[in-house]
Image (tube, rainbow, N blue to C red):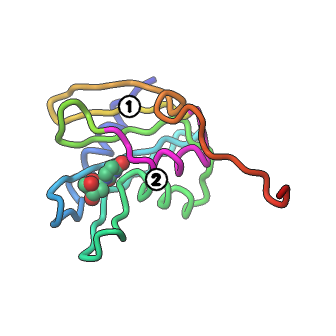
Amino acid sequence: MDWQPLIAAARIAREHAYAPYSGFAVGAALQTDSGEIFSGCNLENRSYGMTICAERSAVAQAVTAGHRRFEAVVVVADSAPPARPCGLCLDTLAEFNPEIRVLLCNLEGEREELRLTDLLPQPFRFSPGSS
Ligand code: THU
């Protein structure tokens, strides 16, 4: 797997982060099964709970463009060790691919490669209408 294009896209997206409250900029980039890349950054709000994380921003970009099959996601932040996605983002990624490949990176080039199953081994599931 060539992670470089995804890392580059996530780093560029991170530069566009709107994070005036936390000061913690995050970038994410998703690769679709057709090889396309969609990126996102975190977007905060004065009403803190409205924050959109970088990963969910990237998923929204991809889904809006008609893509739902994702093979890999890269997350870049300035933290050591590399930051892990929050629970909302884990569930959002699991909605589309519970086994998606995940690469967590920081600005120093430190990397941690995982599967979503490592971070969220037993995601929430339900069968609509089965109550
Ligand atoms: N953040 C993300 O963008 N992704 C995550 O998975 C965790 C947290 C953002 C949200 C907020 O803008 C900042 O990091 C601090 O929590």
Q: Residues within 10 Å of mark 2 (few under 14, many from 20)?
A: few
Left or right: residue 78 compared with residue 5: left
Mark toward the start of the polypeptide (2 vs 1): 2
Which quadrant of the view contains residue 85? top left
User: Quick check: marks 2 and 1 in contact, CB under 8 Å?
Assistant: no
Would you name the residue on which mark 2 appears? 88
Q: Residues within 10 Å of mark 1 (few under 14, many from 20)?
A: many
Would you name the residue on which mark 1 appears? 103
- Residue 120 — which label? none
Residue at disc 1, CB closer than 8 Å to ligand 1: no
Image x and y of residue 54, in percent: 35, 54
Q: Amino acid at mark 2?
A: Leu
Residue at figure coordinates x 53%, y 46% from the top left: 93
Q: Nearer the viewer, mark 2 or mark 1?
A: 2
From this view, report whether residue 86 is shown above or below residue 109: below
Distance of mark 2 from mark 1, alpha carbons? 17 Å
Left or right: residue 94 compared with residue 39: right
Element type at marker 1? strand
Q: Amino acid at mark 1?
A: Leu
Q: Residue furthest front?
A: 131
Element type at marker 2? helix
Residue at disc 2, CB closer than 8 Å to ligand 1: yes
Residue at figure coordinates x 48%, y 45% from the top left: 90
Left or right: residue 79 compared with residue 119: left
Residue at figure coordinates x 57%, y 43% from the top left: 94
Residue 125 magenta-highlighted: no
Q: Which residues are magenta?
A: 84-99
